[in-house]
């Protein structure tokens, strides 16, 4: 399965996505699902780890958890909007000290392109990715 049924992506033409989540098992699930859909996928465990990757690679879309150690997703979204206002961002959250809806609303206010409440399916994630990167 590829992200654009009319045009198969080759590894060189596939957009680069970056998945950021401190839960290694959940991050691996998302990365595997995105790779099976022919995307080139990078991964990071925190915003601190992700920032240099975004500078070094042609990332088209960031998928980030909100509640993480070192640098939370909300701070990451704020930094990305300052430095890469065109970058597509999907924020995700299962909650924390607050209801996940509160975190997701704040992510939208800060500039996330889409938000997803955990748990969600890989199919839901792929649908959102395809809508945000329709030409790729």
Image (cartoon, rainbow, N blue to C red):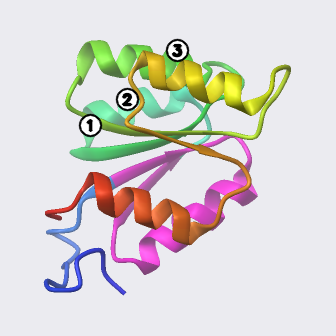
Q: In this view, does 97 lie above or below 22?
A: above
- Kindly indicate whether the residue at mark 2 contacts the one at mark 1 (C-beta within 8 angstroms): yes
Q: Name the residue under label 2.
A: 52
Q: Distance between the residues labelled 3 and 1?
A: 20 Å
Quickly name the residue at label 3. Answer: 75
73 falls in the magenta region: no
- 29 with respect to 51 (left or right): right
For the record, the magenta segment spans: 17-43
Mark closer to the chain start, 3 or 1: 1
Against 64, residue 35 (above or below) is below
Q: Give the residue at x 72% y 24%.
A: 69
Can you identify the residue that label 1 sits on? 56
Task: Report, in whole angstroms, how far the alpha carbon at label 2 lies from the one at label 3.
Answer: 15 Å
Task: Give the x, y percent position of residue 25.
Answer: 74, 59
Query: Is 20 contained in the magenta span?
Result: yes
Image coordinates for residue 95, horizontal then vertical, percent: 78, 32
In front here: 48 or 13? 13
């Amino acid at each position: 399965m590829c992200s654009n049924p009319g045009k198969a992506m080759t590894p060189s033409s596939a957009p680069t996505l970056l998945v950021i989540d401190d839960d290694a098992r959940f991050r691996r699930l998302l990365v595997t699902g995105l790779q099976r859909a022919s995307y080139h996928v990078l991964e990071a465990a925190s915003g601190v780890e992700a920032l240099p990757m975004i500078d070094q690679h042609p990332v088209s879309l960031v998928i980030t958890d909100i509640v993480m150690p070192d640098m939370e997703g909300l701070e990451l979204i704020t930094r990305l909007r300052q430095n890469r206002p065109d970058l597509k961002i999907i924020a995700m959250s299962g909650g924390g000290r607050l209801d996940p809806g509160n975190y997701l609303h704040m992510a939208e206010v800060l500039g996330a392109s889409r938000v997803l409440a955990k748990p969600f399916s890989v199919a839901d994630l792929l649908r959102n990715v395809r809508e945000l990167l329709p030409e790729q």
